[in-house]
Amino acid sequence: MAYTTIDNPELYFQCKLYTGNGSDDHAMTFDNTDTSMQPDMVWMKSRTQSGYNHYLVDVVRGVTKAIRPNLTNDEDTYSDAFKSFDSNGFTLDDDTSNSEINQNTKTYVAWCWKAGGSASSNTNGSTTSSVSANTTGGFSIATYPGNGSSGATIGHGLSTTAPKIVLIKKRSAADSWTMLNTNIDLNKYLKLNGNDAEVSDPMFNNTAPTTSVFTVDSDGQVNENSNTFVAYCFSEVQGFSKFGTYTGNGNADGAFVYTGFRPAFVMLKNTTDARNWIIVDNKRLGYNTITSALYPDNNDAEASASGDPVMDILSNGFKLRDTSDHWNESGDTFIYMAFAEQPFVNSKGVPCNAR
């Protein structure tokens, strides 16, 4: 029972459900009034409307700049969609030009992370980056220019820990999302906008990130000359975040995955076969067994997964349910990212209350 280093995970990650109203200044306040968190990255998705894309904004690129996790599109600019990152939430505008994150009566989920506020210049790598980093929560946002040079290094700002996951998107032209995950072969990567199994290609120069930089190859997806990129970097924090693998057993009594906390968010992917990415969280259903999945690689509504038992969220991890090849195919390897709602044991060694 490892002690956590973060007693209140809601200072660094929040899941927010909301209903759109199609109006300006539609403010979203996080539900826990005892916790104030100004997010630096917000990832939104319609729950009820098929065809509405995922939508991601961050403090480094700016509130008007949107990228879509399920698409290869370059960065879009909307002046009337996402308005501001607030002291305990965020605010939307009428969304008339984008029409996907604040439509009247439509329901949405927003997954929100805390980085380090406004960006600063980082010269740790061979390429200068602009970075917003939160070393306590193990999350940073870095933007950088590509130079087409194999072995280029980019500073990520996490300083005390090396990221286990780096997720990169080209901003200035259409291209796939590229994920470095140190739980798989460093000569392979994962594509967030598609259901592909792990892809063999040394996008990250077969080099693990260090406490100061990550390394990219000359490939256009991560380092094309005269293009701009954004990288989202995640390091593990005991009792708050966990990034690992498990093996499916093809059984309704699926594998138990220990995280050391009760998850608020779990994203997983079959790396052996071409299967969808899956996201579940602690809010959209709110009780076990979780059936309300969303798919980062497509624009399906939440209802598409209704009735399929994905997992039980437990006080110290999660347990897979059902025989689905998307999250429990027998013998296949799955990667996961999990963030905490509540630690299993607090920083003083006291067990936390179970749900």
Image (cartoon, rainbow, N blue to C red):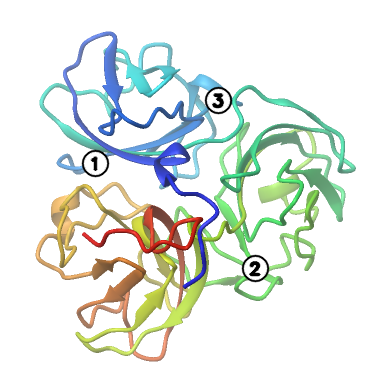
- Separation of disc 3 and disc 1 at Cα? 26 Å
Label ID, residue 158? none
Q: Which residue is mark 1?
A: 51
Asked if disc 3 and disc 1 are in contact, CB closer than 8 Å, the reply is: no
Mark sitting on residue 182 = 2
What amino acid does circle 2 point to? Thr
Q: Are marks 2 and 1 in contact (CB under 8 Å)?
A: no
In the displayed image of the protein, which residue is found farthest to the top? 24
Q: Quadrant of residue 226?
A: top right
Q: Secondary structure at mark 1?
A: loop
Location of residue 351 with respect to 328 vertically, above or below: above
Q: Residue at x 16, y 18 (%)?
A: 21
The quarter of the rendered structure image containing the C terminus is: bottom left
* Mark 3, residue position: 59
Q: Which residue: 13% across, 53% down?
A: 303
Establish if 228 lies above or below 77.
below
- Disc 3 crowd rating (10 Å Cα; few below 14, some 14-19, many 20+) is many
The structure residue drawn at horizontal position 79% and vertical position 65%, both measured from the top left corner, is 207
Q: Earlier in the sequence, mark 2 or mark 3?
A: 3
Q: Position of residue 143 (x, y in %)?
A: 68, 34
Q: Give the label, 2 or 1, closer to the camera.
A: 2
Q: Position of residue 96 (x, y in %)?
A: 27, 14
Residue 229, x across and y down, in percent = 67, 37
Q: Which residue is painted at 74% across and 35% down in the image? A: 144
Judging from the image, what secondary structure is the residue with disc 2 in?
loop
Residue 12 appearing in the image: yes
